[in-house]
Image (spheres, helix red, strand yellow):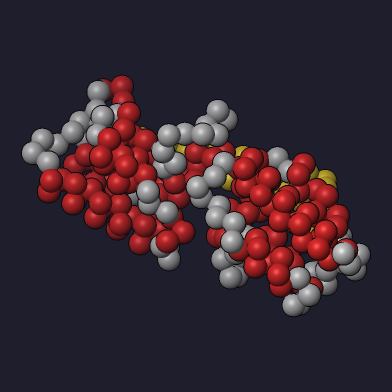
Amino acid sequence: MNEASPKGAFIVNDCAAAIIGTGNRARDLLELRYQLLGVHPGCIYYHFWGTLLQPGFENPEYLNDFAEWANSGLRDVKLAEELGVLDPLDFPDLDALRREIVEVIDEHLDEIKIVPSAPPDRQFHFNRSQIIIFDTKRSAATLPELAELIPRLSPGSVFYHFIDARRRTENGEDDFRAWLRGYGAAHAPLIESIARIHPYFASLCALRERLAAVFGEYLSGVKQ
């Protein structure tokens, strides 16, 4: 159990998002649709995941910015609900997610007679983000050491290792599973338990608690 992974120590990083404005904006639903067709895929990523890294937004009414704007900017609750249920993990890439957003908007436009618009101070601004990575000087050489670290991870560390990692790892999985695979099949049940944790419909703090529980339950079972 205390044997180190052949991959070496798990290096804990933290991260923050530097917001980059694109200059693209929308005053109404048609403009939003038009802009969606051409914006950088990073905008789609930011407006679905970036809110998680913004202080004070632990429990937003809608998890993606498009749904939030439909609700608060356009005052279109039905559209907000239709956009709010989109799960980015249901799509193979950001362009597929983009196409689904546009399709939802098109279907909504077919149902309404007046195109909703936002007040001048509530326009939708397309942003991207640059992830800034920080070395926390913390690491775990063994599975028990990693399990001990998880409850103390910052929200930024949870985002970096459990969410953003999916853009970096070969199999599109989080860093925890990627590291555990260094043990071969030894911890397959733990890897499967981590895979069942959905990263989108929860706050970073809630994800941290769930990860800590899964690691703790697994280690308790191993020791019995």
Q: Residue furthest right?
A: 2
Q: For the point 67% across and 46% down, which residue is it?
A: 208
Q: Position of residue 142 (x, y in %)?
A: 86, 61
For the residue pair 167 and 84, the one nearer the viewer reads as 84
Q: For the point 83% across and 59% down, which residue is it?
A: 220
Q: Position of residue 18 (x, y in %)?
A: 55, 38
Image side of residue 122 versus residue 213, left or right: left
For the residue pair 2 and 44, the one nearer the viewer reads as 2
Count of all numbered marks drawn on residues in the image: 0
As drawn, 66 above or below 193: above
Image quarter in which the C terminus is found:
bottom right
The answer to whether residue 123 is visible is: no
Q: Position of residue 31 (x, y in %)?
A: 22, 40
Q: Residue furthest bottom?
A: 185
Q: For the point 68% across and 67% down, which residue is it?
A: 191
The part of the image, by quadrant, that contains residue 152 is top right
Image quarter in which the N terminus is found:
bottom right
For the residue pair 83 and 44, the one nearer the viewer reads as 83
Q: For the point 47% across and 34% down, which residue is it?
A: 60
Q: Residue furthest left?
A: 113
For the residue pair 128 and 74, the one nearer the viewer reads as 74
Image side of residue 77 versus residue 144, left or right: left
Image side of residue 130 versus residue 221, left or right: left
The answer to whether residue 64 is visible is: yes
Q: Position of residue 14 (x, y in %)?
A: 70, 44
